[in-house]
Amino acid sequence: MGVVIELSYFLTAILFILGLKRMSHPTTARSGIWWAGGGMVLATVVSFMHPEIAGNQLLMVVAILIGGGIAWYTGKRVAMTDMPQMIAIYNGMGGGAAGAIAAVELVKLSSAAAVVAEAAEPAVHHSTFVVFLAVLGAMIGTVSFSGSCVAYAKLQGLMKKVIRFPNQQKVNMAVFALMVLFGLLIIFSSHPQIGVILLFFLLALAFGAMMAVPIGGADMPVVISLFNAFTGLAVAFEGFVLQNSALIIAGTVVGAAGTLLTQLMAKAMNRPISNVLFSGFGDTGGGPAEEVTGSMKAMEPMDAAVMMSYASKVVIVPGYGLAVAQAQHKIWEMTELLEERGVEVKFAIHPVAGRMPGHMNVLLAEAGVPYDKIYDLEEINSDFANTDVALVIGANDVVNPSAKSDKSSPIYGMPILDVDEAKNVLVIKRGQGTGFSGIENKLFFLENTSMVYGDGQKVAAELIQHIKTL
Amino acid sequence: MIESFALLYVFMLAGFVGYEVISRVPVILHTPLMSGSNFVHGIVLVGAMVALGHADTSLERVIGFVGVLLGAGNAVGGYVVTERMLEMFKSSKGK
């Protein structure tokens, strides 16, 4: 039986790796998740026959049905715009599970130590090294659990305030040090007290939450990705404890991949990871902001429709505001109309458009926009100079030229879409206020910029009406 | 001892595999891929099952039960949302 299980885990590991590989290319991405899913089902089914499972199978089935059922239901219902927080909460559950595995093993250690000592027989499973890995995995997994829960609450809007207090870093460090201390106590005592184990887990829970609490919404994706890598590592460490190669391989692969993904995201946002974790957004940059001169010009949807219909090249720059207004379907309808008239239309996506890198692509894909019409920042930026109309809808900071010119701006240095180089810029915007970061946008005051005020979806519908009549 | 070291090698090699698999991935796939790797560590479910499987006291059973429940949530939820996202990626040539 053991051989069958090991072979199945081996196959699962292969399916996971190939699945992830396929997921990293758009044409094969969908089959990738199927491959990985097949591996997961295989591993789960054969694990019921695992030699170390002595009983409790009924409890397992019940737990799987409850946990899986809830996740299935919520996963199917969640709106695409809310995807980031959903990923956060599922990731947190994985971290919690890793923590629970460690908890079972440590509690066993605590109750079994006395018996083992009497028998004068060294427990094979509980060498100091193994206990060390269990504690380390428990720490990382539990931190990921509570941190992800906070990330979820923040993005879901359940927790609006960014909580900061004086000496926050020092308090966090103190909690961290205490957590490590209790971890060491467990590792080096031959039979740890239940109380010590409990305190250790409580401290880890507190530290995870405190780590995530001061981080602003815009930085959350990077943090979620980091917690994802954390959970992977925690799973790998618990795999060592259980001597389970499937856990070690899958966990490590995710740990490494997640770390790299976190770096890529941080780079796309031009925010070093240390900055994300240890300083709030907008804390940097001193001196008064550059004066913004000029005035905004308003334009009627009718005129905007004419301008786009007779252009030869239009680039649409969507932002999170587009998704909030649920205007992506209307925009795609408009794009199809423009293409029928022979206008070349492209979509330009900033790496951090939406709530996390790639989120905007998902939202556009949902509306039916094919991915080969969607261009990255590097691909499209040289194109703006020969673009007739750049249509900015629901985006703000990512097209703010201050990022290139104004050293005092909090977003200085962030790569932006060079929309200001297009011959004409149309900005669809709700009102005259500033964006997500509260920074004034110079783009809106430029000579070649016109503002079309109104709700994204309504304006898009009007544009469609007008283009049809032309 | 040798067994532990073999696992350590597995750990090291898997780390490189993870790094290689993800490098050079286009930005458009960052979110689905993060979600996909989130699904993959749902394998923790298997570990939680083993932990619950050899739980003896009721405290261990309760913790193990919670572990399996959370692990199943990770695996199923991760799969569902990743599949939903990737389902929408279509090429204009495909039509």
Image (tube, grey):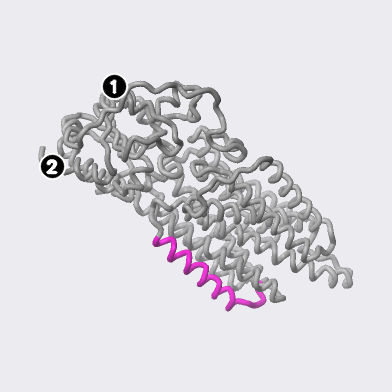
Subunit that carries the residue with mark 1: A
Question: Is residue B17 among what the camera can see?
Answer: no
Q: Is residue A195 left or right of residue A345?
A: right
Find residue A110 and report its horizontal and vertical position in percent: 79, 67
Residue placed under numbered mark 1 in the picture:
A447
Q: Are marks 1 and 2 on the same chain?
A: yes
**Of the residues shown, which amino acid type is indicated by label 1?**
Glu
Q: Quadrant of residue A236?
A: bottom right
| Residue A84 position within the rendered picture, expressed as x and y whole percent measured from the top left | 46, 50
Magenta segment: A53-77
Side of A335 where A38 appears, left or right: right
Residue A415 seen: yes
The residue pinned by badge 2 equals: A468
Q: Is residue A242 left or right of residue B19?
A: right
Name the chain letter of the residue that bears numbered label 2. A
Mark 1 or 2: in front is 1
Q: Residues within 10 Å of mark 1 (few under 14, many from 20)?
A: some
Magenta highlight: main SS: helix
Q: Is residue A177 left or right of residue B39?
A: right
Where residue A16 appears, x then y in whole percent?
52, 55
Residue at (24%, 45%) from the top-left corner? A458
Residue found 59% across the figure and 69% down from its top = A47
Q: Is residue A451 above or below residue A36?
A: above
Q: Earlier in the sequence, mark 1 or mark 2?
A: 1
- Name the residue at the left extreme: A469
Nearer to me, B39 or A173: A173
Check the image and report above or below for A372 versus A378.
Answer: below
Label 2 sits on a secondary structure element that is helix
Whole-Å distance between the Cαs marked 1 and 2?
29 Å
The residue under the point 75% across, 68% down is A108
